[in-house]
Amino acid sequence: MVVESKVKGFICTTAHPKGCAESVRRQIAHAKTKGQVDGPKKALIIGSSTGYGLASRIAVAYGYGASTIGVAFEKEGRPEKKRTASAGWYNTKAFEELAAADGLYAKSFNGDGFSDEMKQQVIDTIREDFGQVDLVVYSLAAPRRTVTDKATGESKAVSSVLKTTGEPYTNRTLDLRTNEITEVTVPVATEDEIRDTITVMGGEDWEEWIRQLDEAGVLADGCVTLAYSYIGPTMTHPIYKDGSIGQAKKDLFETSKRISEHFSGKNVKAYVSVNKALVTQSSAAIPIVPLYISLLYKVMKNQGVHEGCIEQMVRLYTEKLPARETDAEGYIRMDDLEMKPEVQAEVAKVWEAVATENIAEFGDIDGYWEDFYQMFGFRYDNVDYSEDVEI
Ligand code: NAD
């Protein structure tokens, strides 16, 4: 079937298998240019199919020569309904094939990473194939989580929200349907919504993974585990750092300290890496952030310091993590270039001046949309999109 992009708001409902493979191929090519360093050899990546998780998998496979087990929640293709698989499904398939061709072990699980069943399947595979894991990356980003009460066995769905705390917050945003700058008022999250957002995006499930891996005896002494966060400049704080998602990220950081403390006897160390704001399926859904990203991309590209997910993750795993380089609080700062004073001063200046009429001048709208389409495997100059492909 010939696959075309179908964009609805901030999501594309189709994905191109060859384009997704091209995206993975390019990320691997970048990782290969950086060469190998000493590091963990048996890695588990939870949220391994897109964005930062996929880039992490590639960075450790090629940066350390690591064997990788990936966990993600993706949709298979339904050729009878002419429905493509999700991008993460194609990415995963492409990664497995390319890694195998390079002699690297790569096995992937598709299903709910929050569930005990998935944890058990992964544990069984680690035991059989690896013995133990010495790196666990937690890069799961989800809008909801099914939580099962262990005592009663009852399940319920809990959803995260992207709202502010304190007072409603009004600022400009980029309307992705029209490329217009519009005003948006972000409502205040209720206590329940904040609690639920922490349940979905906080540290509970990360800690549960580590606890279950340890109890099963498949967590190696000296294992390193990482999860990802974002801080950003003040204009994004009401929606991110001080918003409902920010409360979940605070919980994630507290969890990292708890894991390191609890497993200090095994010398297990947990880190939160603060990554750069980038176009991913998760970040496109956050109000205000797409406008900030389009201005940031322009400024960082002009200053020659722009990075994508793979550049960020290769730098994390081959430079910052081996050096155990953290800030005073203990965060690994991959947002170091984004937060440079000269970058932020320029973004703040254009933030004041940007309007629908001049967005093309101040913002990298083309770069935003290029990243967006490429996330789903479209707009690669070396892929023939008129060709019939197997979905
Ligand atoms: P993403 O949407 O690209 O990736 C999410 C991953 O989670 C996918 O592999 C998906 O399949 C998987 N997933 C979702 N639900 C799942 C489930 N129930 N079970 C198993 N897997 C599931 O998101 P991303 O932007 O790469 O985010 C990854 C992490 O990085 C998040 O913690 C996010 O907050 C953080 N982060 C993102 C940015 C950014 O700008 N995108 C910046 C800093 C930090």
Image (cartoon, rainbow, N blue to C red):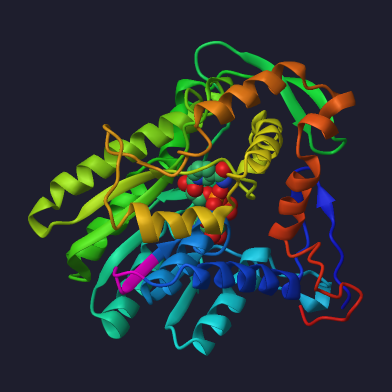
Q: Which residues are magenta?
A: 37-44
- Residue in the picture at 11% in, 51% down: 264
Q: Is residue 303 above or below residue 7?
A: above
Nearer-the-camera pick, 107 or 363 = 363
Outermost residue to the top = 167
The quarter holding residue 374 reads bottom right
Q: Is residue 188 above or below residue 16?
A: above
Nearer-the-camera pick, 16 or 324 = 324
By secondary structure, the bulk of the magenta-drawn segment is best described as loop
The question of residue 319 being in magenta is answered with no
Question: How many circles with numbers are drawn on the protein?
Answer: 0
The quarter holding residue 368 reads top right
Q: Position of residue 235 (x, y in %)?
A: 58, 20
- Residue in the picture at 65% in, 35% down: 296
- Residue in the picture at 53% in, 89% down: 101
Q: Is residue 201 above or below residue 87?
A: above
Q: Is 311 positioned to the left or the right of 26 in the image?
A: left
Q: Position of residue 54 (x, y in %)?
A: 53, 63
Q: Is residue 216 visible?
A: yes
Q: Position of residue 119 (x, y in %)?
A: 36, 65
Nearer-the-camera pick, 240 or 215 = 240
- Residue in the picture at 67% in, 28% down: 288
Nearer-the-camera pick, 162 or 275 = 275
Q: Quadrant of the C terminus?
A: bottom right
